[in-house]
Image (cartoon, coloured by chain):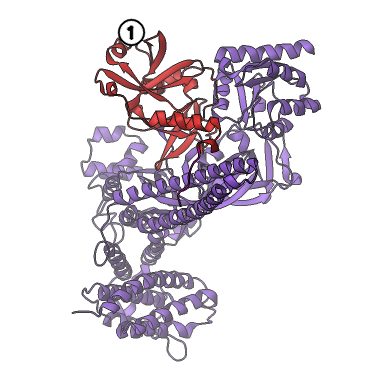
Chain colours: A red, B purple
Amino acid sequence: MKLQLKENGFAAELNDLLQRRAERVKPRPAEAVDENLLWVAEFPVGEETYAIPLSALRAAVPLRMVTPVPLSPPHVIGILRFQGQILTALSLASLLGGRGWREDPAVLLVVDPGFGRLVAVDCERIPKPTGVPHAQVEEARARTSSAVCEITLPGMRQMSLLDLGRLMDRRNVEKR
Amino acid sequence: MSMDPLLEQLLTGFVDESQEIYERVTRSLMELEKEPAQGARFDELARGLHTLKGSAATLGLDELADFAHRMEDVVLPLRGSAQPLPSQMADAVLKSLDTWMARLRATAHKGDLPDLAPSYTLLAQVKPSANGERKSEANGEQKPAANGKANGEHKPSAAATLAANVARPAEEAEAAASSDDTSGDSWRVSTRQVIALLHEVERLREVRLRIDERRRDLDKALQQLDRLGIQSETAEARALMLGLRRALTADGEEAADIVVSMEDGLKAISTMPVRTVLEPLRRAVRDICKASGKLAKLSVVGSEVSLDRRVLEQLRGPLVHLVRNAVDHGLELPEVREARGKHREGALTIRVEQQGNMLFIEVADDGAGLDIEGIRETALRRQLAPAEELGNMTAQQLQQIVFRPGFSTKAEATEFSGRGVGLDVVRNQIQALQGHVEVQSVPGQGARFVLTLPAELGSSPVLVVRCGEHQLGLPMVAVESSRAAKSADLRVGRSRVQLEHREQLIPLQDLGALVGLRQPEVPPDGAPLLILQSQGRRMALSVDEVLGDKELVIRPLPMEVRDLSAYQGAATLARGELVLILRPDWLVNLERKTEAGLSGTRRALVVDDSLTARALHRTALETGGYLVHTASNGRQALEQLRHSAYDVMVCDIGMEEMDGYELTVAVRQRAETDSMPILLVSARDSDTDRQRGTAVGADGFLTKKDCVSGRLLSEVSAVIARRKGMS
């Protein structure tokens, strides 16, 4: 027997949620294949918008089953298992030098910072994919040697693109 | 020669079963050489021989059944004797057992069958006569083997040859055992494939956890439906969901069972207990001692650790070599030891420890130690280095020369430790396993060889304890005993606590304080205490609860936290959660870092049910020089406050169990904390929250979005200043 879902059987909130999920899984628009765009995963940290290259994002998992590690540096939230590996979960706001936050992070992004192993960072919301013109990224990167480069998007929207490798480089973390 | 397929199949199992019996009987024989031939030990010996005989007969292996019968004939008449088994008899039965095992293996693998006749002769020579005497006793055989008369007329060669003959079949049996894994009816599977399968099991465990998550989500949906009341529109959906929940529960349980059985199966395929390699060394030690006239006792610590089979097989040779060297070159003769003020019996110790993905094996003796000048002279004679260089070398550098090819000297070589194989071969074998070997020696006190190897597989027994909300593991090898705390046994000083344990005072530490979770607490009566021993040091450790011992696969920590010297690694518990495994040497060597001694340090208690929020507050506060302890709920915070004083509490409002307002009220009701500065933080920014916070006694309010490092610190300083102003 097939379960019939009646629209009026759900709360409006639930319908909205399903609608948003459906939007998210819709195929990317045609311009998404534009080779001049760098696809990034965009997410908030407090009042600011940050992004990482989509190619570095491996998974977004609920922030559960993280084992705290006593005596670890404060930017370490704990360790967790992911696909048979043990990963470190790091606090992004802490890595960024102590940022405020709007919601207690409920998501962990499993990322490949580019040094051959995966790391998880916390995130307030599931990121959304955004295309940023390559030229704009290159221009912003040329202006800074730090792990965070600021990009101004159409509509004067600011986005900070993170270089995860640099951000998690032990020497940089210790300096902070 | 063709063999009945059924017999062939049965033989494989019989070889394994016999190997276990062989090991038990060997151990019993060696023990009964030292103690009266009676009691449980003798029963075990008799039972073992009888089982070998009976099982061989059942399989139609009449020669082996008869041969086992002959061994029984030799041993059984001595049952109940107040004397130990005569040494020569034990030798003969041990050698015969080796031959029996070698013949069984040869039968199973259709190899050349060893001749039983010499063993029959040997047994006949030691068989007690009707009046209980052995034939050879007439010749007065009980002379030390080193005298060269051990075997009288039956063994024309020197004592060393006799002992070597006794020892060799054991090696052959080992070699045959080792070759079993690479031939016959087994499959060749690469280690990489097994490890890949282990990772798949881990993934399956995660799937199982996700099934649990789905079931919990379903529970929530059912609760929502229940809130709507049972209505006809939802009845059908509710029934379906209940069915789905039952199915998910069953699926979750089945998945859990599969994970456990796959893990057990893979563990059995890929690992074996290290004792399978170490136990035969007892026999080697005994044989060399008999031949050389030395006395030695071999102690093994950590033999229950299970290791990668491949590594273990390749460790056999190096370990045999090191143990032989230790007895033959290291230990002195009993009379020499006595003259040097040592016990006549030399002590040999093999210690096995797995720390994360590293395996440490230590082979130590309390003999004469390495002869530094002898090494220098040999190296010079063999031109291993220029004279000038040798002259400038430190003792430590000279000790490393023993690993150079060709160092082994003929003068020092004997039947057991010479054999044309030097320590360079040991080093090469260990290096082939991506490991390394080091030697440390103290003249007159002994030598210690430490093998360090990577160990990707393997499990160790771990005692899991609770400390606050944390579960932590302690390798069982370091846990000597456990007991309950009794205030009468505690000596509480200003800077340390000691425990009177078995008429000794040993330091007592609070695990929670050691790992920075709280300020040190003196354990109340009845609190569990663990007595730990590592690196010759002993200590008592108080924990909140002992959760039990488990056989766990310890895996290395990820790079970001691998430098933390407190931990060996982490292991996964049955429900999928990770547990950190503490390093015993870190615990026993830790100088008590009394936080009480950090008199100028300000202390903050952060209470938040969000792990990330706690991390962020800690980051900010530690930057400002605070010592930070954390609690994940109000109940825990109150428990912390009962034992410790804090300069400030930073507390989240929106906690599930007891919210920040309720906690503030509870804190204000206690005399010890009624004036402690409290800063409330919230994800919401509302005047109502601020006003309610002030009403219940909080000193400040900050939204989480404003919790940037500088702002949090300035707010914390402000609430502290406000409280001071009020007082």
Can you say whether B585 is above or below B642 in the image?
Answer: below
**Magenta run includes residue B354:** no
Residue B115, image x, y percentages: 24, 79
Which image quadrant: the N terminus of chain B? Answer: bottom left
Q: Which residue is mark 1?
A: A143
Residue B655, image x, y percentages: 64, 30
Q: Main secondary structure of the magenta part?
A: loop
Residue B174, image x, y percentages: 31, 65
Can you say whether B342 is above or below B130 in the image?
Answer: above
Can you say whether A142 is above or below B536 in the image?
Answer: above
In the image, A7 versus B417, the foreground residue is: A7
So how many labels did they put on this image?
1
Residue B490, image x, y percentages: 72, 42
In the image, A106 versus B470, the foreground residue is: A106
Q: Residue at x 26, y 61 (%)?
A: B187
Q: Which residues are magenta?
A: A2-6
Query: Is residue B368 among the parts visible in the rendering?
Result: no
Query: Is residue A74 among the parts visible in the rendering?
Result: yes
User: Label 1 crowding class (10 Å Cα cut-off): few <14, some 14-19, many 20+?
Assistant: few
Which image quadrant: the C terminus of chain B? Answer: top right
In the image, B441 versus B625, the foreground residue is: B625
Q: Given the image, on which type of amino acid does mark 1 rest?
A: Arg
Q: Residue at x 27, y 23 (%)?
A: A30
* Subunit ID for the residue under disc 1: A
Q: Residue furthest bottom?
A: B130
Can you say whether B153 is above or below B585 in the image?
Answer: below
Q: Residue furthest left?
A: B1
Rendered image quadrant of residue B185: bottom left
